[in-house]
Every structure is written in C-alpha cells, then in structure tokens.
Amino acid sequence: MPVTNKPSGDPRTNTGVLVTNLGTPDAPTPAALRRYLAEFLADPDVVTLPRFIWLPLLYGLILPFRPKRSAVAYARIWTPAGSPLLIQSRSIASALSRELDARVGRKVPLALGMRYGNPSLAEALIELAAEGVTHIVVLPLYPQYARATVGSTVDRLKQLSNSTLICIEGYCSHPHYINALASNVRDYWEKHGRGQRLLISFHGIPKQVALKGDPYADQCAETARLLAAQLKLRDSEWQLTFQSRFGKAEWLKPYTDIKLQELAAAGVKTVDVICPGFAADCLRYADTYLEAGGQELHYIPALNDRPDHIRALAELVMARFAD
C-alpha cells in the first residue's frame, strides 16, 4: 500500500481536496457504455490478466457486445438528472465542501473527479490548480482499500499531477464511519421494521487477488464485524457476503446471490441488506431472493450525504490537514 504523507500545521491556503469515485458512463447508451468500459476494463489494476491475453478479448469479444446489454441495465436506473452514482457523488462533495468551509473558517478548494468517465481526474486537477492549489488531500469514496480502486486512483493521480498528494487510503474501521453506518441501519429499522437477517454485502474481488496480499477482504470483514458489534447483533443475525462477481474465476465468498437463495430455502422470509462499501445503491438480487421463496428483501440505502456521513468524511480530511 502506498505511503500516505501528511502536511503539518493548520490548513494552508494552497491545500485543496479532491473527492473521487469509480465513475459512470455519460449516458445509458451503447456508445457511451463502450467508451466507459474501454477505459475501465483496460486498467491492469481492474483486470490483472496478462495484456496479450486480455486486450484481444476485451476489444474482440467484450466491447463489441457487452455495451448493448449494459446499456439496458443502466437505462433502468438512469434518472432525468443523470447517473445516480454521479448525482450522489456530487451531493456528497457539495455537503463536504460546506462542512469543511465551516470548520476551517474559509473556502476550501474542493473538486470532484471520477477514476473513469466524467468529470475526470484530469478535469478536477485543472479545477484545483486554477485556485492555486499545490497540496491535495485525496478522498476516494472507498472505505475499504483495494488495489483496483484506491490503488489505481492514486497511481493515476501521480501520473497526472505534480502537486503534493495526501491520500486517504481507506477508513474501514474509522469510528465516525462505523457510527454513521449503525445509525443508518437503526433509522431504517425504526421506519420499516427489521428483517430476520442482515446481510452486509461488499463488492467482490477475485480470490487470487486477495491471496496475493490485497487487504480488501480483511478490511471488509473488519467493517462488517464492527458494524454488527455496534448493532449488538448475534452471529446468527448477520452475514458478510460479496456481490458483483463476473467471469469464471473464484471470487471472494460467500456470494450474495447464493446466500440469498440459501436463506430463502431455509425459510428465512425477510432479509435486510446494507452495502457499506458503496456510495450508490448497488444491490441487484431482489429477484433472485424472491424466486427462491423469500418474501421480502429490503435494501438499506447507502450513507450518501447523511449529515453523520459527511461529518465522518470531514474528520478524515481534517486529520490530513494537520499532524
């Protein structure tokens, strides 16, 4: 994991903040999906196969066909204002900007840039440079560090920028983050009732990547354990799972979709799901659970721009402003 450097003293006027997330296509169309997937899937941190094997597959088999199928899925979630992930990322960035300004007592330069797609990291860096920023606190919206997310983003920023980068490389166990997650779950249960089981679901990565030393799986487990403890759940009342696998290789287990089928077959009628690693709503398994005999699958929304989430992010940023 790259070394994190921190400036000393109070926030300098030439210090800014770069909030970054995964990214999204510009539109729910095959052409836009093709551009986005070409950038995303060509990243060697995302697909670790040798380039001479992967790139012919990407350009010869995947990009000619997958964008059309993906565009249909994106169209289902697209809003009149655009991509939900981009809308939510902008809301988080705007709320964080207001919180930091209030804490520091002046305007703190802040920009939003996506690792893939628009607004790009390059555009965000140009925006910050125009405000005289030479030191950048980088806040990737990934609480759990993975080489394919935080690592890739940091490396790309180092390629693009000569500024001093102060990188927040995961916050899986930060108390304010865990407290915000627990409060979010309690708020949901108070309004909608509580299911028989809580699945704490994270995006998966290939098992082989974890075996090579990527800390992501351990950090997901740590977040899940701390959240369950904060909620005072017994072991039988919650389960850590992983979603969004693709390809034939083994990914981190247990798989969310398989676990939902197992719970339904075991007579568990109501399940709540929270995805602590996402800023956007990413669960797509309601049909899987219902078809297997379950009755109710409740998705607990992401933290988004909840005030306690924004305060947690502000704590992370402010800690990088001073020793």
Image (spheres, rainbow, N blue to C red):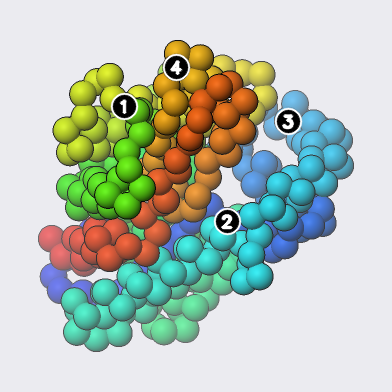
C-alpha span from label 2 to label 1: 30 Å
Question: Residue at (72%, 62%) from the top-left corner?
Answer: 27
**Left or right position of 205 against 247:** left
Question: Residue 267: which disc?
Answer: 4
Q: Answer above or below: position of 322 versus 62.
A: below
**Sequence order check: which comes first, mark 2 or mark 1?**
2
| Mark 2: secondary structure | strand
**Left or right position of 181 against 9:** right
**Sequence order check: which comes first, mark 1 or mark 4?**
1
Disc 4 crowd, CA 10 A, few/some/many (<14, 14-19, 20+): few
**Sequence order check: which comes first, mark 3 or mark 4?**
3
Question: Residue at (57%, 56%) from the top-left corner?
Answer: 23
Question: Residue at (42%, 51%) from the top-left corner?
Answer: 301
- The residue type indicated by label 1 comes to Trp
The reply to whether discs 2 and 4 touch (Cβ–Cβ < 8 Å) is no
Q: Answer above or below: position of 21 versus 96.
A: above
The reply to whether discs 2 and 3 touch (Cβ–Cβ < 8 Å) is no
Foreground tag (1 vs 3): 1
Quarter of the picture containing the N terminus is top left
Relative image position of residue 179 (x, y in whole percent): 20, 49
**Left or right position of 97 against 149:** left
Relative image position of residue 25 (x, y in whole percent): 68, 58
Quarter of the picture containing the C terminus is bottom left
**In which quarter of the view is residue 115 placed?**
bottom right
Q: Which residue is mark 2?
A: 23
- The residue type indicated by label 3 comes to Trp
Relative image position of residue 101 (x, y in whole percent): 26, 80
- The residue type indicated by label 2 comes to Gly
Q: In this rendering, does residue 2 appear at all?
A: no
Q: Which residue is mark 3?
A: 54
Question: Residue 238: which disc?
Answer: 1
* Residue 66 vs residue 158, the one in the foreground: 66
